[in-house]
C-alpha cells in the first residue's frame, strides 16, 4: 500500500506537533520547578552528621580539598575518609591531616590481589564506621564551595526526611570537553532536581548527597546491585527516595565542585558506566525519562523532514524556534540557580546531540556487557 504524499505530510506534521507538546510538558512541569524553586528555610535542629569520602590514590586532591571539608561552620560533625587500597601518598596525607583535625577519622582497606572490589564496598565500610545517623557523601576530588555546605544540607533533615539531594558541578576550564561535561552535569541535575520537586525523586549524585544511616541498613545497603560498577548513588536513591521523605537543596552555598575528566576517553568510560544503571530504575521513572528522550528525537526528526516536504516551510520552523526560545528562557534561569556560566548557547547544540549520543553509549555498553558475559 502506497501512502499519498499529502497523508504522509499530515502524519509527520501531527507527530512533530505532538512531540512539541510533550517537550513543552517536560519543560514547564519539571524543569521550570528548578528555575522557580524557592529554597526552603529548613526547620530541623542541628544534629551531628558524618561526612563520608572514599579515596583511592587521591593524595593530591585530598591535600588540596579535604581541609575545606574539615573546616565547615558546623557545631558537631565528623569526616570519615576510607583509604581504599591506595598506592600513592594518600595514607601519608591523611595521617598529616588527622594530626591537625581531630574530627577526621580514617579507615583503610588493604589491597588483596585475590579479592577485587569497587566503590560500594568502601562506601559501605565508611557508613558502618559512621557514629551519626545523618550521612553526607562527597568524593575525594570534590570541594564544597562554602563553609556552610554541611549546615545547608543538614537543615532539611526533619523527622520524615531520609534524603537530601544537592548539586555537584564541575570546575570551569578551557576547551570543548570541559564545556560539554559541565553542560551534561547541569542537564542531568535539572532532570533529577525537577523530578524530585515534582514528587518523583529518582536519583542523586554521590558528589553531594545526604541520607540517613538507618535507611541504608534497613534496606540492606547496595545488596541488590553490588555486582554493578556504578549505582551507589542513583540506584540507592531510586529504590528508596519518595515524595514525602526527600528534600532538595540548591542554594549557591550548598554546591560542590569537582575535577572533571581530563580526556574524552575517560569521560566516555564514566558516562557509559552511569548510563547502564538507568535500565534498573523504577518502571515509571524509565517511562518518564524515555518519553522525554523519544519525543526529542521525534521533534528533531519531524522538523528536518518537514523542511523538505511541507509548504509553507516557515510553519515548522516557527514551532522549532518557539521551543528553542522557551527552552533558553528556562535554561538561563536554571543555570543561574546552579551557578553555571557560559553554557546557554551550547545548550542548544547539546539538546540536539545528547539523545543520540546517549543511545550510542547505551548500545556500546550493552555490547560490552554481552561480550564480557560470553567470555
Image (cartoon, rainbow, N blue to C red):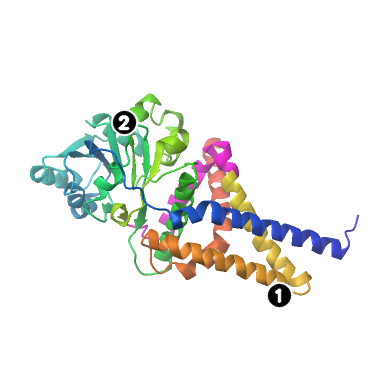
Calculate the distance from the C-alpha at mark 1 to the C-alpha at mark 2: 57 Å
Decide if residue 294 is in sight here: yes
- Magenta stretch holds residue 284: yes
Q: Residue farthest to the left? A: 99
Q: Nearer the viewer, mark 1 or mark 2?
A: 1
Q: Position of residue 320 (x, y in %)?
A: 64, 68
Q: Is residue 55 magenta?
A: no
- Label 1–label 2 contact, CB within 8 A: no
Q: Which residue is mark 2?
A: 213
Element at badge 2?
helix
Q: Where residue 314 is drawn, which disc sits there?
A: 1
Return the residue nearer the eye: 108 or 126: 126
In this picture, residue 343 sits left or right of residue 251: right
* Magenta residues (range): 259-287
- Kindly state the secondary structure of the residue where label 1 is placed: helix
Q: Residues within 10 Å of mark 1 (few under 14, many from 20)?
A: few
Q: Image height check: is 122 above or below 188? A: above
Please identify the quadrant where the N terminus is shown: bottom right
- Which residue is at a point 41% across and 44% down the rendered structure image? 204
Which residue sits at x=17%, y=47%?
A: 70
Where's residue 190, x and y in %?
46, 54
Amino acid at each position: 500500500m502506497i501512502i499519498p504524499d499529502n497523508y504522509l505530510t499530515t502524519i509527520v506534521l501531527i507527530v512533530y506537533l505532538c512531540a512539541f507538546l510533550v517537550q513543552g510538558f517536560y519543560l514547564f512541569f519539571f524543569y521550570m520547578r528548578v528555575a522557580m524553586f524557592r529554597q526552603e528555610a529548613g526547620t530541623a535542629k542541628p544534629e551531628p552528621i558524618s561526612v563520608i569520602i572514599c579515596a583511592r590514590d587521591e593524595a593530591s586532591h585530598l591535600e588540596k580539598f579535604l581541609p575545606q571539608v574539615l573546616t565547615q561552620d558546623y557545631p558537631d560533625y565528623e569526616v570519615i575518609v576510607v583509604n581504599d587500597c591506595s598506592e600513592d601518598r594518600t595514607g601519608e596525607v591523611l595521617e598529616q591531616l588527622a594530626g591537625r583535625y581531630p574530627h577526621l577519622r580514617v579507615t583503610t582497606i588493604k589491597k588483596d590481589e585475590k579479592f577485587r572490589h569497587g566503590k560500594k564496598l568502601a562506601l559501605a565500610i565508611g557508613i558502618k564506621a559512621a557514629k551519626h545517623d545523618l550521612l553526607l557523601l562527597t568524593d575525594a576530588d570534590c570541594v564544597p564551595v562554602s563553609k556552610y555546605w554541611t549546615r545547608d544540607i543538614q537543615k532539611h533533615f526533619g523527622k520524615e526526611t531520609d534524603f537530601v539531594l544537592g548539586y555537584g558541578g564541575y570546575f570551569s576550564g578551557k576547551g570543548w570537553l570541559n564545556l560539554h561535561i559541565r553542560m551534561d552535569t547541569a542537564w542531568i541535575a535539572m532532570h533529577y532536581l525537577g523530578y524530585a520537586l515534582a514528587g518523583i525523586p529518582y536519583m542523586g549524585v554521590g558528589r553531594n548527597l545526604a541520607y540517613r544511616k538507618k535507611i541504608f541498613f534497613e534496606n540492606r545497603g547496595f545488596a541488590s546491585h553490588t555486582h554493578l560498577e556504578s549505582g551507589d548513588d542513583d540506584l540507592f536513591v531510586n529504590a528508596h527516595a519518595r515524595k514525602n521523605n526527600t528534600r532538595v537543596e540548591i542554594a549557591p552555598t550548598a554546591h560542590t565542585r569537582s575535577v572533571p575528566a581530563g580526556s574524552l576517553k575517560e569521560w566516555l568510560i564514566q558516562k557509559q558506566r552511569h548510563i547502564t544503571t538507568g535500565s534498573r530504575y523504577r518502571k515509571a521513572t524509565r517511562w518518564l525519562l524515555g518519553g522525554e528522550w523519544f519525543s526529542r528525537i521525534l521533534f528533531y526528526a519531524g522538523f528536518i523532514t518537514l523542511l523538505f516536504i511541507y509548504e509553507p516551510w516557515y510553519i515548522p520552523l516557527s514551532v522549532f524556534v518557539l521551543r528553542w526560545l522557551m527552552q533558553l528562557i528556562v535554561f538561563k534561569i536554571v543555570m543561574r540557580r546552579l551557578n553555571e556560566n557560559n553554557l546557554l548557547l551550547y545548550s542548544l547544540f547539546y539538546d540536539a546531540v545528547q539523545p543520540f549520543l546517549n543511545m550510542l553509549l547505551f548500545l556500546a555498553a550493552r555490547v560490552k556487557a554481552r561480550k564480557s558475559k560470553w567470555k
